[in-house]
Amino acid sequence: MIRVNLLGVRDARQAVGRRRQVAVVVLSLLLALLMMTVPFSLQRHRLNRLDAEVAALQAEIATLNERAKEVRDLDKKRLDLEAKLKIITDLKQKRVGPVRVLEDLGGATPEKLWLVEFTDVGGAATLTGMALDNQTIATFMRHLLASDYFYEVDLVETAQTDVARAGPAPLAGTGLKRFIIKARLDYLGRGGKSAGPPTAGGGAKTGA
């Protein structure tokens, strides 16, 4: 009778089975590790790309901010220059303003009207004088309103007076109209349209 020892074959099969189990476990672990590693790598790559884009945008913003600052500086310099030019122009006009005011005042004075006093305090003028009649005073006021240096012309007082010794020699002893006129002065010759009260020529006073 022949006897066959099957224990070695059984042990061999069990060993092969154990190796397969180990291999399956290792492959499972590798697969799980791969499944975790690939998304992480992709996410890391995406984050790096976004970081690069953010850095590029920040650099572009910094460049634009620098250019905007240069534009603001240029605008400020332009405004400063324009303000200085305006001041220079105003000073030139104010320097000749009082002369032009007196020229317009002389040109506006009609015949048969005599100015006794002209005062100017801070651009507020008071004109005192005598005229032959009310029509002559009205003509004088119209001439003042037509000037670029007088505005807000207002007759504040008029009264009949005897010239006597105070008046012109040809009219001594005759009755004249004494008047007081208030007006505003614009030494820039803009008829009061400019902002701010005139300052040049303030306090000027002439008498006749």
Image (spheres, rainbow, N blue to C red):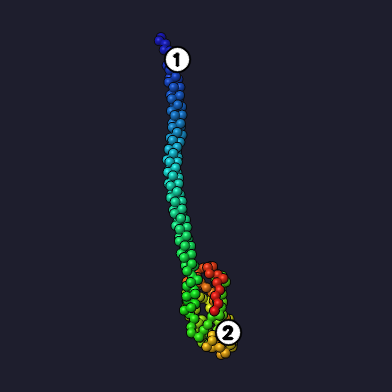
Q: Which one is in front, 150 or 106?
A: 106
Quarter where residue 204 is shown? bottom right
- Residue plotted at (48% across, 84% down): 111
Quadrant in which the C terminus appears: bottom right
Q: Which one is in front, 75 or 21?
A: 75
Label number found at residue 99: none
- Residue plotted at (51% across, 81% down): 141
For numbered disc 2, what is the local secondary structure? loop
On the question of residue 189 being in view, the answer is yes
Q: Which one is in front, 136 or 70?
A: 136
- The percent position of residue 84, horizontal first and vertical second, equals 47, 60
For numbered disc 1, what is the local secondary structure? helix
Q: Which one is in front, 155 or 101?
A: 101
- The percent position of residue 13, horizontal first and vertical second, equals 43, 19
* Residue, disc 2: 166
Q: Amino acid at mark 2?
A: Ala
